[in-house]
Each structure stands twice: as C-alpha cells, then as structure tokens.
Image: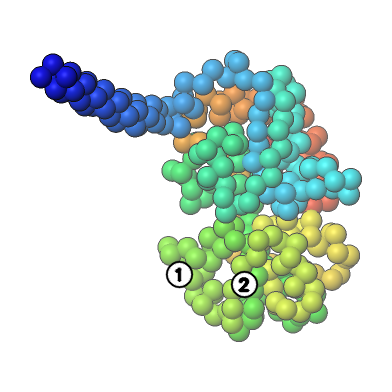
Amino acid sequence: MKRRMLTVMAAAMMVFAMTGCGSKETAAPAETEAAAETTAEETAETADEGERTSFTVGFDAEFPPYGFRDDNGEYVGFDLDLAQEVCNRQGWELVKQPIDWDAKDMELSSGAIDCIWNGFTVNGREEDYTWSIPYVDNSQVFVVGADSGIAGKADLAGKIVGVQKESSALAALEDEENQENLDLAASFADLVQYADYNTAFMDLEAGAIDAVAMDIGVANYQIGQRGEGQFVILEDYLSSEQYAIGFLKGNDTLKDAVESTLLEMVEDGTFMEIAEKYADYGVTDCVCLGK
C-alpha cells in the first residue's frame, strides 16, 4: 500500500510539473505580444537623435540625376550629395542604401532605412509619411523620338507608352480624380511598366515602345546621356509635383533635425552650389529652395 501511495504521489507531482511547464510556455507568446505593442511610430518619437551616429538613406539607384551609380561604380546624385552634406554637419555617417522602389514602404517601416530621399513625390502621399519641406518643383513629361511625329499628348493615342512601376508618372496616369489623364491612358495601345527607366529608354531606342512618361529631371539626364537631337520632351506636360524627404509617419524628431540642417544649407548657399553640379540636367531650374 505504501508503494501504491508513493506511485500516486509521484504521478501527482508529474502532473503538477507538466502544468507548470505548460503555464510557462503559454506566457511567452503573451510577453512577446505585449512587447510588440511598441510600434515603429512610438520608437521613432522616442529616439534620441543626439545619440545618432549614422543616417541611412533609401534611394533608387537608377534614378538620375537624384541617385545613380557613376562610371566609377560610386553612388552619386543631387539627393545623395544633399544627404552627405547634412551628415557632415550633423556628425553622422551617411549610409547609401539602394532599394527596390516598390519595396520602399517595407524598408522604411522595418527600420532598414531612416528615410526615402530620392526624387520622392509628396503629391498624393501627404498623409502616408512625415515630410520635410519640399525642395524641388517637378513635372511629369513624355519623352519621344525626335523623328517620331508625336507632337503632343493627343498623338499618343494608339501608341505604346512606357513608365516605371510605382512612379509618379504612373500615379498621374491612374489618378481617379483626373479624368483627362485617365482618358489619355485609356487611349494608349498599351502602358508598359518597367523596373527602371534605363530599360525603358533601351526599348524606346529600339522602337519597342513609342514614348516614356517620367520625371523631367530624369528625362533631361537620360536625353543628355544619349546624344543631342535623338529624343525630345513634349511641351504638353502630364502633371506637376513636389519632391521632399519622406520619413516614417510620426518621426518628427529626425525630420526636424534633417530639415533644419537643409535650411542652413539654403541660407549659406551650399544648397544651390550642390544643385549647380547638376545644372545640365535641369536641377537648378526645378529647385524651389535657395532662390
């Protein structure tokens, strides 16, 4: 009987031990879930920018003259030069992070980048990010072959038009509040979406498409790289917009630090000095700061 009692007691202790382990296992997910309640926005608000040592800029590496790879394999461009000067003055290390443009929101929300700074359009995205002051007034245009016979937007009816995925030009053509642009896009024989404008221009040169819808600054750069007289920009613009620096929604602390430094650069003339480096691509005509 003693042996039987010991057996019962041992079984009871095993049940108690298993119950205890089970309670511990179920508590872990609850703790994890509670920790996850700290949102990216709260983290951004509480970050002490005084302790920052680096600044990671997300950019499209094939979006000249704002961000691209030069002949030496270095990442350069108007926006990257501005970011470098901001970092120099703040004592930060600039980290240039090329990103897939259609993954920009994931990169920003995950903390992989601190901002999107690369010809980033405010219009239509006003509530999606915390924005700096706009620094470029930009337009969306159509580029066609100089001998294409296309003189205006009306001539694009029945033509094949190229555009970059997730771009401002695509957004303008799909703007449900702009019936004129919707009708224009509906008149195309096809609207081909590209990962980058270099590929789009290669198809334009080969005659695979008839026009490319794009930012005027990028258009000027691409035309300049391919020889004078080969392509033209239609005077009939698609739309106008403004560029600014996009930060994670709620990250006013970092936005204020970067923006105040940018305005210092405007005041002492450094902003326009950097813009002058890209004057051949129309940057000085587009900037809305420092004038």
- Residue 192, labelled with which disc? 2
The residue at 52%/45% (across/down) is 106
Residue 194: percent from the left, percent from the top?
Answer: 65, 65
Q: Looking at the image, which residue sits at the far left?
A: 1
Q: Residues within 10 Å of mark 1 (few under 14, many from 20)?
A: few
Q: Quadrant of residue 157?
A: bottom right
- Residue 241, labelled with which disc? none
Position of 156 with respect to 10 (left or right) is right
Q: Looking at the image, which residue sits at the far bottom?
A: 158
Position of 103 with respect to 233 (left or right) is left
Residue 209: percent from the left, percent from the top?
Answer: 70, 77
Residue 108: percent from the left, percent from the top?
Answer: 55, 39
Using the image, determine if residue 7 lies above or below residue 111. Answer: above
The residue at 64%/81% (across/down) is 159
Residue 23 visible in the displayed image? no
Which SS class for mark 1?
Answer: helix
Q: Quadrant of residue 50?
A: top right
Circle 1 is placed at which residue position?
179
Q: In this view of the protein, which residue sits in the foreground, 79 or 233?
A: 79
Is the C terminus in the top left, top right, bottom left or bottom right quadrant? top right
* Dot in front, 1 or 2: 2
The residue at 45%/69% (across/down) is 179
Amino acid type, mark 2: Val
